Amino acid sequence: MPIRITHSNQSSLYYITFTCYDWLPLFQFTNSCDLVYKWFNYLQTEKNIKTTAYVIMPNHLHCILFFPLPDFSLNKIISNAKRFIAYEIIKRLKETNQIEVLHQLQSAVTDKEKKKGQIHKVFEESFDAKNIDNRKFFLQKLNYIHLNPVRGNYKLVNDWREYEHSSAGFYELQQVKHFVAVHYEELK
């Protein structure tokens, strides 16, 4: 049974991670990084929540979000994102006839979840969120995010600054590929 944590709504910066079910590379299978960019744009234009750093990996996402005003619900924001992205991932899996993956995601749904209308399990239940309350911790998380594509089993690129779905190019090379992050020095 997942442990649900209600996160504080007083901090302005959060490091956030959420993961595809069973670490399946669903972002890769469905070429769905654009869904994350749509979410980032929605946060910025509709909620005034700014993305200061991110990396979209084949099976998980790390980002740092800036909340300029208190009284937000981090749990609601992330659950809505996961729901929106999940519907689109399922749609793309169906369009590309990835039957085995769909079956795996469908068989992971518990009876209790089925009673609530859930058909597929696209993401792990919980998400990780850490309050960033000082520059040192921010820079630690920023480096972790940006180096993710060249760590462990991934080796997605030779130069971490050139990974297409990361804000590393923005910070290190002043290049924007898909989404313009808000530089942490510009946060107010």
Image (spheres, rainbow, N blue to C red):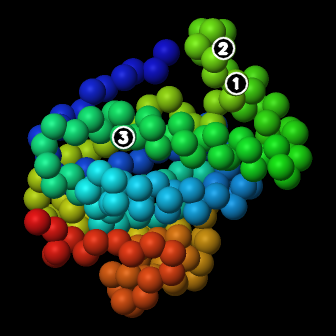
- Residue identifier under label 1: 119
Cβ–Cβ below 8 Å for labels 2 and 1? Answer: yes
Q: Residue at x 64, y 40 (%)?
A: 87
Disc 2 crowd, CA 10 A, few/some/many (<14, 14-19, 20+): few
- Residue identifier under label 3: 77
Quadrant hosting residue 106:
top right
Image vertical order of residue 115 relative to residue 139, above or below: above
Report whether 78 appears left or right of 188.
Answer: right
Q: Amino acid at mark 2?
A: Lys
Closer to the chain start, of discs 2 and 1, is 2
User: Residue 113 placed where, x, y %?
Assistant: 60, 15
Report whether 177 appears left or right of 32.
Answer: left
Q: Residue at x 76, y 23 (%)?
A: 107
Report whether 62 appears left or right of 30.
Answer: left
Report whether 44 appears left or right of 93.
Answer: left
Task: Identify the mark at residue 114; answer none if there is no mark.
Answer: 2
